[in-house]
Amino acid sequence: MPMYEYGCAACASHFDLLRRIDQDDADIQCPQCGSRHIQRQISVFAAFTKESSGSTPTMQAKSGGCCSGGACGCASRN
C-alpha cells in the first residue's frame, strides 16, 4: 500500500496516510481539526547513489507525480 501525504485547507496541518490505491482520496478527515477539506500533496523523496568512482555517495531529490520515462520532458530538468 502506498503512503500518501495530505494537507488540510482548514488548519494547514500536514499528515501521512497509508491507503490502498483505490482509496487514495476517499473519506479523509484531518486528525488535527476534523475538517474534510483535504488536498493530496506532491511527495518528495531522496535517492542515494554512489559516484562512478565508488567513493562518495550523492543524494538526488525527486518529486513525485512525474512520468518515469521522461515523455513529459521531466528527464531534461534533472
Image (cartoon, rainbow, N blue to C red):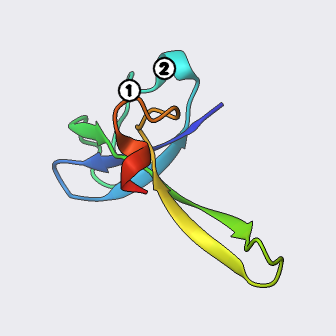
In this view, the residue in front, 51 or 5, is 51
Left or right: 57, with 19 as reference point: right
- Residue 31 appears in view: no
In this view, the residue in front, 58 or 21, is 58
Which residue is found at the position 80% from the left and 78% from the top?
Answer: 53
Which residue is found at the position 45% from the left and 44% from the top?
Answer: 64
User: Label 2 neighbourhood size at 10 Å, few (<14), some (14-19), many (20+)?
Assistant: few
In this view, the residue in front, 8 or 2, is 2
* Element on which disc 1 rests: loop
- Identify the residue under disc 1: 25
15 is higher (above) or lower (below) than 49: above
Asked whether the residues under the numbered discs 2 and 1 touch, taking CB atoms below 8 Å apart as contact, a structural biologist would say yes
In whole angstroms, how far apart are the C-alphas of marks 2 and 1? 6 Å
In this view, the residue in front, 6 or 60, is 60
18 is higher (above) or lower (below) than 60: above
* Disc ID at residue 43: none
Indicate the position of residue 10 as horizontal and vertical percent values: 16, 50
Which residue is found at the position 30% from the left and 49% from the top?
Answer: 7
51 is higher (above) or lower (below) than 42: below
Q: In the image, what residue type sits under mark 2?
A: Gln
- Residue 11 appears in view: yes
19 is higher (above) or lower (below) than 64: above
Left or right: 71, with 33 as reference point: right
Quadrant of the drawing holding the C terminus: bottom left
Which residue is found at the position 25% from the left and 34% from the top?
Answer: 36
* Element on which disc 2 rests: helix
* Disc ID at residue 23: 2
Indicate the position of residue 2 as horizontal and vertical percent values: 60, 35
In the image as oriented, which residue stretches furthest toward the bottom? 56
Q: In the image, what residue type sits under mark 1?
A: Asp
Left or right: 1, with 44 as reference point: right
Indicate the position of residue 31 as horizontal and vertical percent values: 39, 49
